[in-house]
C-alpha cells in the first residue's frame, strides 16, 4: 500500500506570529510535473486588515531605530538565510528550478540583503542636503520613511524578487505587507521563518499568500497604507492600483521591467522610492544665543 505524503501546511505571517487565514481557505499549488507542493493559505480581506494594523503598530519603533541598527538586522537576516541555504535550494527545485539556478538565486538573495544592509546608514547622507538660503538659517532636506508599504511580489522569482523588493523598503525604515508569489509560494513563506528567527520586530514584515486578483484591490484602497509596489506587467491591475491609490494619495510604484538577477536591482534609488523628503529650517545662533544676521 502506497504511503500518502503529509504535505506541509504553510501559514501566513502577521505581527510576528504564524496564524492560519481567518477565512479557513487554502489552495494546493503544483509544479510543472503536476506534483502538489503544499497546503497554502488563501488569505482574505480581513487578513490584509490585520497585517496593516500590525505594520502600522510596528512603524514607530522600526523607523526610530538607529540606521546602523537596521543595517545590523538586515545583515542578521542574511546570516540566518545562509544557515538555511540547503532548504531554500530544495524548495526552489521543487518549484521547477534547476540545481544551479536554485543555488544561484539563494546566494544572490543573501548578497542582496547584505548590499541593502550596507546602505542603511548611508543613503540619508547621499540623498540629503544642506540647502543655501538667503536668511540666517540652516536649511536641511533629509529622506524619511513614508510609512506602511504593501508589496505584490514578483510571481516568477519567488525568493530573489521578494528579497529584492522588501530589503530597500525596510532598510529605509518602512514596514510592509507582502503578498507572496501565488504559484511559487514555498520560499516566500519559509522566508517568514527566517524573518522570525532574526532580530526583526514583529509587524515590520508581514507575509500573506493568496490570489493577487482578489487581494490587490484591498491593498490598493486601504486608507492606512502609504505606498504600494506592484511587480508584474498586468496593465488592468496597474490601472486598478492607480485608481484606488488615489483615494488617499497613496504612492503607486511599478517594478514591471526590472531583472531581479541583474545589478539594476542593487540600487539605492530603490530605497528612495518609499521615502519622503522632509525640509527643516533652523535659526543660526551665535555663542551668546542671539540670532546672527548677514
Image: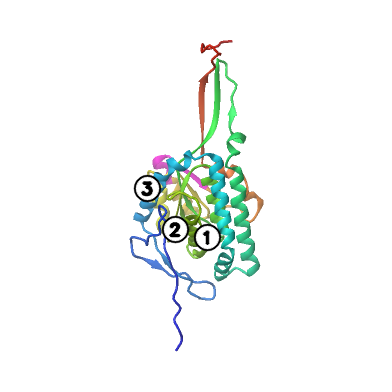
Work out whether mark 3 precedes mark 2 in sequence or the reverse, and give the earlier one. Answer: 3
Check disc 1: other Cα within 10 Å, few if <14, some if 14-19, many if 20+. some
The residue indicated by pointer 2 is 212
Identify the secondary structure beneath mark 2: helix
State the extent of the magenta-drawn residues as a range.
Answer: 243-253
Vertical arrangement, residue 250 with respect to residue 7, above or below: above
Name the residue carrying label 3.
53
Tell me, what colour scheme is on the image?
rainbow
| Numbered mark located on residue 62 in the image | none
The secondary element bearing badge 3 is classed as helix
At horizontal 60% and vertical 68% (from top left) the residue drawn is 97
Q: Residue furthest bottom?
A: 1
Real-space Cα distance between discs 3 and 2?
Answer: 20 Å
Residue 261: % across, % down: 63, 56
> Any magenta on residue 45?
no
Circle 2 packing at 10 Å, graded few (<14), some (14-19), many (20+), is some
Q: Secondary structure at mark 1?
A: loop
> Compared with residue 127, is residue 289 higher up or lower down, i.e. above or below?
above
Amino acid at each position: 500500500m502506497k504511503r500518502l505524503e503529509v504535505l506541509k501546511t504553510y501559514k501566513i505571517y502577521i505581527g510576528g506570529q504564524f496564524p492560519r487565514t481567518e477565512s479557513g481557505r487554502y489552495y494546493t499549488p503544483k509544479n510543472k510535473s503536476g506534483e502538489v507542493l503544499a497546503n497554502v493559505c488563501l488569505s482574505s480581506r480581513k487578513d490584509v486588515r490585520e497585517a496593516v494594523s500590525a505594520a502600522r503598530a510596528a512603524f514607530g519603533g522600526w523607523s526610530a531605530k538607529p540606521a546602523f541598527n537596521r543595517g545590523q538586522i538586515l545583515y542578521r537576516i542574511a546570516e540566518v538565510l545562509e544557515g538555511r541555504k540547503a532548504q531554500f535550494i530544495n524548495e526552489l527545485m521543487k518549484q521547477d528550478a534547476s540545481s544551479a539556478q536554485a543555488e544561484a538565486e539563494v546566494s544572490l538573495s543573501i548578497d542582496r540583503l547584505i548590499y541593502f544592509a550596507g546602505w542603511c546608514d548611508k543613503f540619508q547622507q547621499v540623498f540629503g542636503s544642506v540647502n543655501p538660503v538667503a536668511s540666517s538659517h540652516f536649511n536641511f532636506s533629509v529622506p524619511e520613511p513614508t510609512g506602511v508599504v504593501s508589496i505584490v511580489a514578483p510571481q516568477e522569482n519567488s525568493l530573489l524578487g521578494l528579497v529584492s523588493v522588501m530589503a530597500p523598503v525596510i532598510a529605509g525604515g518602512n514596514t510592509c505587507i507582502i503578498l507572496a508569489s501565488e504559484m511559487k509560494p514555498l520560499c516566500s513563506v519559509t522566508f517568514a521563518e527566517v524573518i522570525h528567527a532574526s532580530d526583526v520586530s514583529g509587524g515590520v514584515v508581514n507575509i500573506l499568500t493568496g490570489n493577487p486578483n482578489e487581494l490587490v484591490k484591498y491593498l490598493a484602497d486601504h486608507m492606512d497604507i502609504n505606498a504600494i509596489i506592484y511587480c508584474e506587467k498586468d496593465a488592468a491591475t496597474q490601472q486598478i492600483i492607480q485608481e484606488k491609490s488615489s483615494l488617499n494619495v497613496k504612492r503607486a510604484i511599478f517594478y514591471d521591467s526590472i531583472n531581479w538577477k541583474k545589478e539594476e536591482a542593487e540600487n539605492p534609488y530603490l530605497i528612495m522610492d518609499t521615502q519622503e523628503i522632509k525640509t527643516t529650517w533652523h535659526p543660526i545662533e551665535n555663542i551668546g544665543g542671539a540670532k546672527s544676521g548677514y
